[in-house]
Amino acid sequence: MEHRDTALITGASGGIGLELAKIHAAGGGDLVLVARSKDKLDRIKARLEADHRITVTVLPCDLAHPDAAQRIFKQTQQLGIHIDVLINNAGFGGHGRFHQRDLADEQAMMQVNMVSLTNLTHLYLPDMIARRHGRILNVSSVVSFMPGPLQAVYYATKAFVTSFSQAVAQEVAEHRITVTALCPGPVDTGFVEAGNLEGVGAWKNAKSAQSVARFGYRAMQRGELIAINEPRLRLMVNWIMPFLPRKTLLNFSQRLMEKNSPS
């Protein structure tokens, strides 16, 4: 990829998205940053442009809106911006038993985690294919490989992202486009607070957003299909989970999500 490639990053105001923006900017690449908070994006724009002499375009947008992806695409078209790297990072979770959670929250989660990601990919892929140049990084999760009691919808959305990413990667490989699903374990971001996950033991050993972003960006550059950032998690996903009885896996998954679970 050329240094001046332009990357569009959703969820770019913090966490993994912000760290990915910093990495791309440090390599000399221009950016289109998407998040809900214009103030945060404007501050990031000022800092990255000053530090790296690049161009940062800010597009404040809530991806929970059904027409969000189309609005983003239309704005980049009007500005004459070709997107070389699409990073679908925005996403959120939520803790609790499915029947007790607010349905509107679950629908917003599905819209952000799956629908807007799918729409953005569909909108930007044709130009990448026409130019035979482009990379897509979809931020999924290691939980995409198992069902998730107490986070039923979140886990399911990430299963969609991981499956979708691999299928599209196969379809577009002949056009020299790559699609990578980044599937990290727990990451130290605002995800815990936003998803009401305080006290869940699985986040005790969360990795830094910076380290996950570095790992994911390198995997994207190499065109990897699946990128799991921790060796022990790769072992679990590839060599242990496939052989566990289904009920054992479900019990294990639920225990991971129980609050104040023992170490």
Image: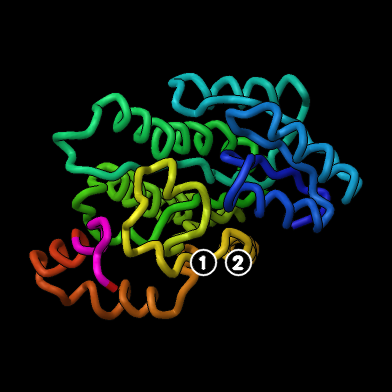
Left or right: 171 in relation to 263: right
Q: Please provide percent x and percent y for residue 252.
A: 18, 67
Place residue 183 in its image quadrant.
bottom left
| Residue 42 in magenta stretch | no
Sort mark 2 into few (<14), some (14-19) or many (20+) by Cα contacts within 10 Å. few
Tell me which amino acid carries mark 2: Ser
Left or right: 160 in relation to 214: left
Distance, label 2 to label 1, CA atoms, is 7 Å
Looking at the image, residue 235 lies above or below residue 8: below
Residue with the mark numbered 1:
207
Q: Please provide percent x and percent y for residue 233.
A: 38, 74
Looking at the image, residue 215 lies above or below residue 124: below
The coloring applied to the image is: rainbow
Q: Are marks 2 and 1 in contact (CB under 8 Å)?
A: yes
Looking at the image, residue 121 lies above or below residue 58: below
Place residue 113 in its image quadrant.
top left
Residue closer to the observer: 73 or 12: 12
Name which residue lies at 29% across and 73% down.
263
Q: Please provide percent x and percent y for residue 56.
A: 79, 37
Left or right: 261 in relation to 120: left
- Label 1, secondary structure: give it: strand
Residue with the mark numbered 2:
211
Highlighted range, magenta:
255-262
Q: Please provide percent x and percent y for residue 25.
A: 79, 51
Place residue 170 in its image quadrant.
bottom left
Tell me which amino acid carries mark 1: Lys
Residue closer to the observer: 245 or 185: 185
- Label 2, secondary structure: give it: helix
| Residue 257 in magenta stretch | yes
